[in-house]
Image: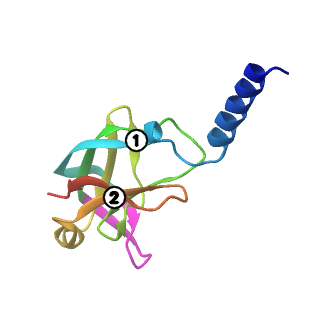
Amino acid sequence: MNMMTRLSAAVLLLTLALASSGLAQPWDRPRFHDIKVERKTLEPPAQVRDAQGQLREYREAFVVRLAGTLPPPRDMALEIFIGDWRVPEYRGDAEGITFRIYEPELLGRLKGKELSYRLGPEPLRAIGLKLP
């Protein structure tokens, strides 16, 4: 092999190794630019387990919309945090992430806290937004 072929092969192998390593590349990170919280009436009511594991029925929820872009789907979980509280469930789409907070007391404790995320095994990263 000549030098150019070896160099091309090395670059290709390095690219494949990084892509399969599971570590997110900078262009594969979520980017969020806005957050809104809206109180909604739920019809039909939602059946959800509370922090103690008890099944409860909620007729209202605070819907949190985190606007931005998400990386393409991959084998690493994206976890969202408000302060040290992990968002247990969310829905992602082309314009960001939506999740619900059912307890007004929890919303009160989380107001003003920093949002962060973790992608797979990586450390927490600040989003640069606070819960209003």
Report if residue 67 lies within the magenta region. Answer: no
Characterize the local packing of mark 2: few (<14), some (14-19) or many (20 or more) Cα atoms within 10 angstroms.
Answer: many
Q: How is the image coloured?
A: rainbow
Q: Up-down: is 43 above or below 94?
A: below
SS for callout 2? strand
Characterize the local packing of mark 1: few (<14), some (14-19) or many (20 or more) Cα atoms within 10 angstroms.
Answer: some
Q: Nearer the viewer, residue 113 or 2?
A: 2
Q: Determine the image quadrant of residue 85.
A: bottom left
Mark 1 in CB contact with mark 2 (< 8 angstroms): no
Q: Where residue 2 sits: x, y (%)? A: 81, 20
Q: Nearer the viewer, residue 90 or 74?
A: 74
Report the side of 101 relative to 71 (left or right): left
**Camera-nearest label, 1 or 2:** 2
Gap between marks 1 and 2 measured at Cα: 16 Å
Furthest residue in direction front, as rendered: 3
Q: Where residue 74 sits: x, y (%)? A: 57, 41
> Mark 2 highlights which residue?
116
Q: Nearer the viewer, residue 25 or 49?
A: 25
- The first of marks 1 and 2 along the sequence is 1
Question: Which residues are the magenta region?
Answer: 46-59
Report the side of 38 relative to 117 (left or right): left
Q: Up-down: is 90 above or below 20?
A: below
Numbered badge on residue 92: 1
Tell me the amino acid under the disc marked 2: Ser
- Main secondary structure of the magenta stretch: strand
Q: Where residue 18 sits: x, y (%)? A: 63, 42
Image quadrant holding the C terminus, namely: bottom left
Image quadrant holding the N terminus, namely: top right
Furthest residue in direction right, as rendered: 1
Q: Residue at x 72, y 34 (%)?
A: 13
SS for callout 1? strand
Q: Where residue 12 sits: x, y (%)? A: 69, 29
